[in-house]
Image (cartoon, helix red, strand yellow):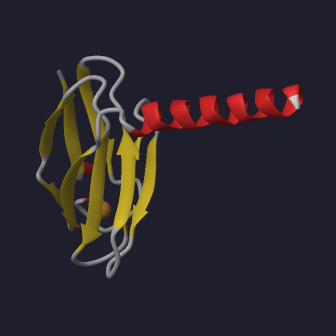
Amino acid sequence: MRRATMGLGAVLLVVALAGTLARAEPARVIGVEAKRFQFTPAELTVKVGQPVTLRLTSVDVTHGFYQKELGIDAEIAPGRTTEVTFTPARTGRFLIICDHFCGSGHGNMHLMVVAE
Ligand SMILES: [Cu+2]
C-alpha cells in the first residue's frame, strides 16, 4: 500500500514537471521564403532565450539552411514547409547560409539572425 502511494507521488511529480516545461515561453513563429538567391526576410532580430520556429518554404529549387552554432541544418524543398526551431543562447550575429548548391548566386544566399 505504502509503495503504491509513493509510486503515485512520483507520477504526479512527473506530470507537474511536464506542465512546467509546457508553460515555458512559447516559440515565436516566423515564415521565411527561399528563392534563387535570397531569403526573405534577409535579416531577423530575435531575443536571447526565446525559442524561434522558422517555417521555411522555397518557391523554386531545393535550398539549404545551415548555421552551426544555432544548430540549424535543414533542406528546403519546393512544395512543402520545413520547420526549424532554435533558441539563441547569447547575443550576436549568426549568418545562416544556403549550403545546397542552387545556382551561380548561391554563395551570396544568406539570412542574418541578430540575437539581442
Ligand atoms: Cu539556395
Which residue does the image show at 19% across and 58% down from the upper left? 31
Where, by quadrant of the figure, is residue 114 drawn? Answer: top left
Percent of width and height locating residue 9? 69, 29
Dividing the image into 4 quarters, which one contains the N terminus?
top right
Residue lying at the far front in this picture: please name it: 1
Judge left or right: residue 9 versus residue 7: left
Residue 68 shows in the view: no
Percent of width and height locating residue 25? 29, 33
Percent of width and height locating residue 36? 21, 67
Above-or-below relation of 79 to 69: below
Judge left or right: residue 52 versus residue 73: left
Judge left or right: residue 2 versus residue 115: right
Q: How many marks?
A: 0
Which residue does the image show at 43% across and 29% down from the upper left? 69
Where, by quadrant of the figure, is residue 3 drawn? Answer: top right
Above-or-below relation of 22 to 31: above
Q: Name the one closer to the observer, 74 or 98.
A: 74
Which residue does the image show at 57% across and 38% down from the upper left? 15
Where, by quadrant of the figure, is residue 7 drawn? Answer: top right
Which residue does the image show at 37% across and 59% down from the upper left? 83
Judge left or right: residue 70 versus residue 46: right
Q: Name the one closer to the observer, 35 or 71.
A: 71
Above-or-below relation of 42 to 22: below
Which quadrant of the picture is home to ligand 1?
bottom left
Dividing the image into 4 quarters, which one contains the C terminus?
top left
Q: Name the one closer to the observer, 39 or 28.
A: 28
Residue 88 shows in the view: yes
Percent of width and height locating residue 64? 39, 58
